[in-house]
Image (cartoon, rainbow, N blue to C red):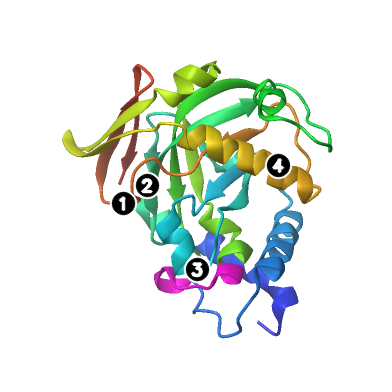
């Protein structure tokens, strides 16, 4: 890898081969990371499916010197169907996150928008898994390298959609199990809605397109789990969503 211009291609190759890259020796700023993230999307030549919130918790932000979350992009080919069997050999060091997914029902144009106006553009919500997978060996990175790696975006899986209602969203709870054994539970509160609003405003400020049909992942409701073999299931929003890793 001769320079930063080669980084998007190297990261894509790491994803395709499931072989991580050595930790980047050069320090990258947040701005450089987002620039490389956009270059990675262009290099990948994939259809943009939406966006993800990352580092939504204060402890994770503090470790990287941040005061707000960050974001990454989702491509349509990252999505997997509920009940899928996923091969661990095709992943590097995956971590499973329970999230709320939102779908935009209309385009959002640049400008000033109050909370109600932005939430009115959200059509549906669903339980979701994100399988985050870092292309940097050992999950070692600074903030710029993390963003260049598309905020460790890997795969995602969506449960059944239901109409978006802000009040119902604030009352979401989840229970995550592995092979039937409870791993954790949580009440979402206003976290997913707050992260959603942050992301929409940040994307608009950064000149990113917000289009009807795009999916937004809220950030983790529970601490990420290092993926092991077996079935993971989450009870959430009145349904069960499951994936199996082999």
Residue 208 location, x and y as percent? 77, 46
Q: Secondary structure at mark 4?
A: helix
Secondary element type, mark 2: strand
Marking on residue 64: 3
Q: CA distance from mark 1 to mark 3?
A: 24 Å
Task: Kindly tell me whether residue 49 is visible in this rendering.
Answer: no
Q: Position of residue 202 (x, y in %)?
A: 70, 47
Mark pair 1, 2: CA separation:
6 Å
Badge 3 crowding class, 10 Å Cα cut-off, few under 14, some 14 to 19, many 20 or more, is some
Q: Which mark is residue 216?
A: none
Q: Residue 198's quadrant in the figure? A: top right
216 vs 152: above or below = above
Residue that badge 2 annotates: 96
Find residue 227 and name its label.
1
Q: Are marks 4 and 2 in contact (CB under 8 Å)?
A: no
Q: Are marks 1 and 2 in contact (CB under 8 Å)?
A: yes
Among the two numbered marks 4 and 2 on one chain, the one whose residue lies closer to the N terminus: 2
- Residue at image mark 4: 201
Q: Residue at x 62, y 36 (%)?
A: 197
For the stretch drawn in magenta, what is the main secondary structure? helix
* 23 displayed left or right of 26: left
Judge the density around disc 4: few (<14), some (14-19), many (≥20) Cα neighbours within 10 Å. Answer: some
- Magenta segment boundaries in residue numbering: 136-145
Mark nearer the N terminus (2 vs 3):
3
């Amino acid at each position: 890898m001769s320079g930063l211009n080669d980084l998007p291609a190297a990261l894509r190759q790491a994803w395709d081969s499931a072989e991580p890259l050595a930790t980047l020796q050069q320090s990258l700023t947040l701005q450089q990371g987002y620039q490389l993230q956009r270059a990675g999307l262009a290099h990948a030549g994939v259809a943009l499916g939406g966006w993800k919130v990352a580092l939504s918790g204060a402890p994770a932000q503090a470790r990287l010197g941040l005061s707000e979350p960050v974001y990454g992009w989702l491509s349509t080919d990252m999505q997997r169907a509920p009940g899928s069997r996923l091969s661990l050999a095709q992943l590097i060091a995956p971590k499973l996150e329970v999230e709320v997914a939102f779908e935009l029902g209309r385009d959002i144009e640049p400008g000033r928008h109050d909370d109600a106006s932005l939430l009115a553009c959200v059509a549906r919500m669903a339980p979701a898994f994100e399988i985050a997978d870092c292309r940097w060996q050992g999950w070692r990175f600074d903030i710029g390298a993390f963003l260049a790696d598309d905020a460790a975006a890997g795969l995602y899986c969506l449960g059944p959609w239901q109409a978006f209602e802000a009040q119902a969203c604030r009352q979401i709870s989840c229970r995550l199990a592995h092979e039937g054994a409870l791993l954790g539970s949580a009440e979402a509160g206003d976290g997913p809605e707050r992260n959603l609003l942050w992301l929409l405003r940040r994307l608009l400020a950064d000149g990113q397109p917000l289009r009807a049909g795009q999916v937004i992942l809220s950030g983790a409701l529970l601490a990420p789990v290092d993926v092991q073999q077996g079935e993971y299931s989450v009870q959430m929003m009145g349904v069960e969503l499951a994936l199996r890793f082999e």
